[in-house]
Amino acid sequence: MDLQLAGKRALVTGASGGLGAEIAAVLAAEGVRVVVHGRDQARTEQTARKVGGEAVIGDLTTDAGAEAVASRTGEVDILVNNAGFYDPATGWADTDADAWAEMYNINVLSSVRLIRHLVPGMRAKGWGRVIQVGSVTGETPSAAQPHYAASNAARLSLARSLARELKHTGVTSNAIAAGAILVPTTREYLLELGRTNGWGETWEEVEHHLPTRTGTDVGRIGDPREYADLITFLASPVSDYITGATIRMDGGRYDR
């Protein structure tokens, strides 16, 4: 399928590694000129070189930092708000009001800041794509990391609200509600969890016991490339009739 993306320009936030880097790579492979955002200069520039794109360094948690990133980026056709933070080890007892505010700032307001700077240019051109990378915890929260779940509910909500704001403009707004993704940080966390619980020492041993394996219809954890492919489709002109949607991609996760 020709996704008709050649010549488009995209900003992918939080793309120095993990899922963001995979999104940047897949977009670039489809002919998109990708701006790779990150806070670590060396890692961000390395990813940008790998995908043949540009690097932009900056902190999106402040108005000044986001404005600087947007200014250095310039006009884009596609904005993928992937930057975010989570801590699976936290619970209600570990999260005070400051922790909630910090999580909201990183996961929600960072996206809002870039939307305010970059979407007006899309609207003026009559075409654009805004994609929020969120989590299924925004729809089905658990007792763990409640501030993360709440921030993702807000991410999914802002995507739909933005779609209403952008109706009839040629700019669409959608969100991904992602389940477990096997990025390096998740793999390290799950390996440590497995070793602590006596499931084994290697990934092959630990994987067999994971809730993400036994608690999904597919029976495994998600690969970053699968998410990147979906996001690339949503970023393309082929997805023109999809807006205001939250697409759940979690392997058919269910509560046991």
Image (cartoon, helix red, strand yellow):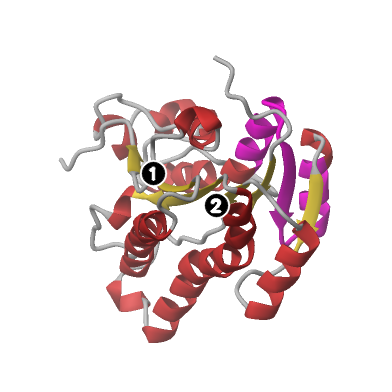
- Residue in front for this viewpoint, 55 or 250: 55
| Horizontal and vertical percent position of residue 202 | 51, 31
Q: Residue 243 got which mark?
A: 1
Q: Earlier in the sequence, mark 1 or mark 2?
A: 2
Secondary element at image label 1: loop
The extreme left residue here reads 256
Residue 14 visible? The answer is: no
Asked if marks 1 and 2 touch (Cβ < 8 Å), the reply is no
- Mainly helix, strand or loop, the magenta region? helix
- Tell me if 125 is positioned left or right of 40 in this view: left
- The amino acid marked with disc number 1 is Thr
Quarter in which the N terminus is drawn:
top right
In the rendering, which numbered label is found on residue 29? none
Magenta-tinted stretch:
21-48
Instruction: Residue 82: give its label.
Output: 2
Circle 2 residues within 10 Å: few <14, some 14–19, many ≥20: many
The location of residue 195, given as percent across then percent down, is 44, 43
Q: Is residue 170 among the parts visible in the rendering?
A: yes
Would residue 209 be found to the left or right of residue 61 on screen? left
Distance (Cα) linking label 1 and label 2: 18 Å
- The residue at the point 55 percent across, 48 percent down is 185
Which quarter of the rendered picture does the C terminus lie within? top left
- For residue 211, which quarter of the picture? top left
Q: What amino acid is labelled 2 in the image?
A: Asn
Where 153 sits versus 208, above or below?
A: below
Which residue occupies 66% across, 70% down?
66
Q: Which residue: 70% across, 34% down?
A: 32
Q: Is residue 98 above or below residue 41?
A: below
Please say whether residue 240 is one of the residues in the magenta stretch: no
The picture places residue 52, in percent across and down from the top left corner, at 82, 35
Q: Tell me, yes or no, whether the highlighted magenta stretch contains residue 34.
A: yes
